[in-house]
Image (cartoon, grey):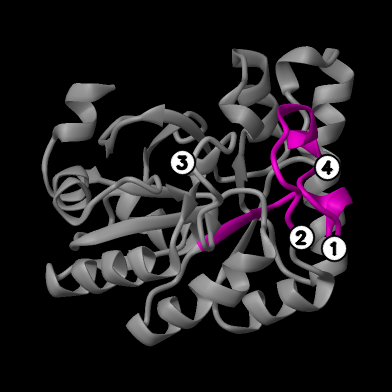
Amino acid sequence: MRIPILMYHQIDVPPPSGTPLRGLVVSPGSFARQMWLLRCLGYKGMSMRNLEPYMRGTIQGKVIGITFDDGYENTVLNALPVLRQMAFTATCYAVSDMIGQTNSWDRHLGVEEKPLMSLDDWLVWRNSGMEIGSHTRTHANLTKLSEAEAYMEIVKSKQELERLLDCEIRHFCYPFGQFEKDHSSAVKEAGYASATTTHRGLIHNGDDPFTLRRVMIARATNVLQFALKVTTGYEDRRS
């Protein structure tokens, strides 16, 4: 088994050159071409929920995970129509206590604040067959919290999202990619089925489901690089 899980943040018009975290903003045109290429290559784009049996090895197939961190409004506006057109599913990780707000956690970096999905946006996402995952309550860096505080961020976000959106929350993503062994244990104890990181690489048989690696897709990722990332061991070699 060798399955790529794509990691996106924003699907929007990239900000001017020199803007902090500009690389995390993939243009809608680039995203559409990437999804079209996946379909041409015979891949089926899947949410983490739909990917579960493939990760367990109970089903075989040419599949690829598609994930979005943070829950930006531009995900539902610009990515969802493309996903639906391709008949793909995807997981978007929500910050449960910041629905309808902005990415204020990046304010200290000078990053322009962008709207996050509203409750109605999340319902549209859910009702379109997409999956909602958890990204903590406040986009907290778990490594800077006490054990009790980190546990509450992990557990309460699941509970809040399930109550608000009336769906099971099975998958988690570590904010900023920062976590320790105790945090992955807490995610498992909270009842999640997996947790994704920002560590680079594909997933393989025997990987810990609570420290899954991903393939980052950035603003500057061209079509050739994208193809290399998903069809070869390029990401594993660069990890």
Numbered disc 4: secondary structure: loop
> What residue do we see at 62% from left, 20% from top?
179
Image quarter where the C terminus lies is top left
Disc 3 vs disc 4: which is toward the camera?
Answer: 3
Residue bearing mark 1: 100
Q: Earlier in the sequence, mark 3 or mark 1?
A: 3
Numbered disc 2: secondary structure: loop
Numbered disc 1: secondary structure: loop
Q: Earlier in the sequence, mark 1 or mark 2?
A: 1
Q: Describe residue 81's horizontal placement relative to residue 181 as left or right.
A: left
Q: Earlier in the sequence, mark 4 or mark 2?
A: 2
Residue 205: x percent and y percent? 25, 35
Residues at marks 1 and 2 touching, judged by CB atoms closer than 8 Å? yes
Residue 199: x percent and y percent? 42, 27
Measured Cα–Cα span from mark 3 to mark 4: 25 Å
Task: State the extent of the magenta-drawn residues as a range.
Answer: 91-115
Residue bearing mark 3: 23
Q: Considering only vertical position in the picture, is 160 above or below 145?
A: below
Residue bearing mark 2: 115
> What residue do we see at 80% from left, 58% from top?
161
Identity of the amino acid at label 2?
Pro
Q: Describe residue 173's horizontal placement relative to residue 124 as left or right.
A: left
